[in-house]
Amino acid sequence: MNEKFLVFLDLTKKMNRKFSVIPMLYGSLGLQMLVNEDLNPDDIDICVPQFLYRLSERWQDLLVFMQSEGYELIDLHEHFFQKDEIGVNIGVIDGDEPEAIPSVEAFLGTDAEEFPILVTDGAIYKLLTLQQYFSVYSRSLEDNYRVEKTVYKDQKKIDIIQKALTETYV
């Protein structure tokens, strides 16, 4: 297991206990768990239920938790934390808030209850399926912000997913 995945598992176990939630492993690190390829993720993308993400609800509790784990909030808008060489982005799994970054649920048009739940070394977490990742990265190509910054990386991931899906169904 790579270092970032181990960090994810550690944070997840603690979130399971402290907040009674099941976080989601998202982004390149999550996709890497499903394909037979090292995607060299830049950071760890963790999605949490909206009540932990919203500034008006329990965000302060999540902030204190991350700080107690040694992470410094670098970007409030992006909910990005840093500890040494490890960056953690916090996103939201469920709900739909106008004028906010869409949740994974809203982005995919899927009920959060449909995301598969996995258990690894005692950490309980959600992980998208290959088909759901295909939808995420395909939709990301329509996002002007991502197109400017990551179009090549997103297209490469789509190609990897298509190959993995083909191998799965052959």
Image (cartoon, grey):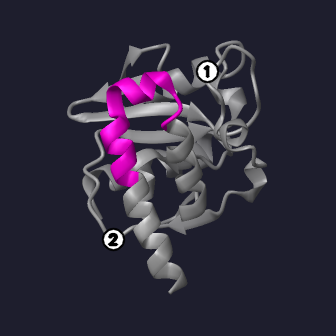
Of residue 60 and residue 165, the one placed in the foreground of this image is 165
Of residue 10 and residue 164, the one placed in the foreground of this image is 164
Question: Which residue is label 1 attached to?
Answer: 59
Residue at the spot 56% in from the left edge and 66% down from the top edge = 119
Q: Are marks 2 and 1 in contact (CB under 8 Å)?
A: no
Q: Secondary structure at mark 2?
A: loop
**Farthest-out residue, left:** 85
**Which amino acid type corresponds to the residue marked 2 in the rendered image?**
Asn
Residue 48 in the image: state x and y as whole percent: 61, 38
Q: Is residue 47 visible?
A: yes
Q: Taken as a whole, is the magenta stretch helix, strand or loop?
A: helix
Residue 72 in the image: state x and y as whole percent: 35, 20
> Compared with residue 97, is residue 3 higher up or lower down, i.e. above or below?
below
**Farthest-out residue, bottom:** 170
Residue at the spot 72% in from the left edge and 18% down from the top edge = 57
Question: Which residue is label 2 attached to?
Answer: 36
Q: Is residue 154 magenta?
A: yes
Residue at the spot 50% in from the left edge and 29% down from the top edge = 65
How many marks the image carries: the answer is: 2
Q: Is residue 14 visible?
A: no
Mark 2, mark 1: which one is toward the viewer? 2
Please give left or right for residue 73 compared with residue 40 in the image. right
> Compared with residue 61, is residue 36 higher up or lower down, i.e. above or below?
below
Answer with mark 2 or mark 1, whichever residue precedes in sequence: 2
**Which amino acid type corresponds to the residue marked 1 in the rendered image?**
Trp
Residue interval drawn in magenta: 141-157
Q: Is residue 62 magenta?
A: no
Mark 2 → mark 1, Cα distance in angstroms: 35 Å
